Amino acid sequence: MLVPIDETNLESVHALLARGFPSQQPSFWLEGLRRQADHHARIQGGPVGQILRVRDQDVGIILTMRSRRIEPDGTTRDVVNLSSWYIDEAHRWLAPRMLKAVMSEAGTVYTDLTPSPSVVHLNGRLGLTVWTDGVLLAALPLAALHYGSAAAQVVPLDQLARDALPEAARTVLEDHARFGCICVALSRGDRLWPVVFARTRHKGLPGARVVYAPSKIELKASIGAVARFLLGQGVISLEIPARRDEGVPGAWFSRLRPPTFTKGGVDAETIDHAYSEFVLLPF
């Protein structure tokens, strides 16, 4: 059976996470679960995950990071990112059953952004499809030399007029700024596009990953302006989730990150890893 994570079973939660991810310090999970719980409380998103229980023994865990999107027609849809799941070896055969149970809501989009090699094969059996194959890894000093996007401008959130973006888009930026992300609007022509970068490290050096961009086409067309802005933020490399046939000046395709998966329908030209483990877990 699945038992929702709440304040009554946090001791078991931390024990399971410690077994499943022994390289992480307890403080990593304390901070990550706090961030997720705070976010779920704001949106009334329910429990932050589920515990798998067999004959009164807690043998597995999965975090279900829920967020909401407002569609152009005003309707909302939920996105649930499946993250940090683990099952004790003796009960590993229950993994497909657990995953099917947590992906049972009609109309909800499910994502898996950091699958292990074994889970990559399992995802296909469960109806998830490949969203991206890896990342475009951009060396920003090289990408900054690209001036084909000279008309593009990057406007930091704190310099953005209150009504410059739709309220839903501005909320995404403000939420992620609180999580420590770099949040901007990309200006090309007469349109503004919200973009969120989560800070990372690549080979010990400061980098960033695009976690939200409604138009990958606009982002790639503006790579020079983006690179020059991020260099000013102390960032020297950028990961753009991508398919293997994509390209951008100053970047090359890499399997530095595993493929991403989705179920429920997403636009292939959209990057939407908002409110995911790239943000809520303090990588």
Image (cartoon, rainbow, N blue to C red):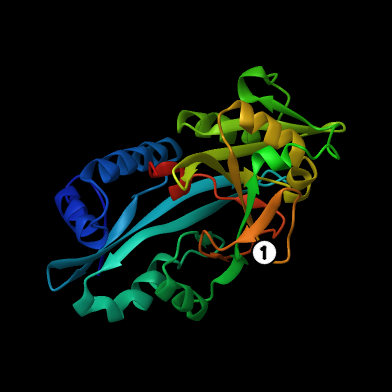
Q: What is the x, y in percent for residue 281?
A: 38, 45
- Drawn side of residue 71 relative to residue 24, left or right: right
**Nearer the observer, 122 or 96:** 122
- At x 47% / y 73%, what residue is drawn? 120
Q: What is the x, y in percent for residue 244?
A: 67, 66
**Nearer the observer, 167 or 262:** 262
Q: Secondary structure at mark 1?
A: loop
Q: What is the x, y in percent for residue 207?
A: 53, 41
- Answer above or below: position of 87 versus 269: below
- Answer above or below: position of 115 versus 251: below
The number of callouts visible is 1
Label 1 environment density (alpha carbons within 10 Å; few <14, some 14–19, many ≥20): some
The amino acid type, in three-letter code, at marker 1 is Arg
Tell me the quarter of the image containing the N terminus: bottom left
Residue 171 seen in this snapshot: no
Residue 160 seen in this snapshot: yes
Q: What is the x, y in percent for residue 16?
A: 20, 59
- At x 62% / y 31%, what residue is drawn? 231
- At x 73% / y 44%, what residue is drawn? 219
Specify the quadrant of the image occupied by residue 30: top left
- Answer above or below: position of 280 versus 109: above
- Drawn side of residue 86 relative to residue 145, left or right: left
- Drawn side of residue 149 relative to residue 110, left or right: right
Tell me the quarter of the image containing the C terminus: top left
**Which residue, given by chain and number where applicable, does mark 1 sit on?**
243
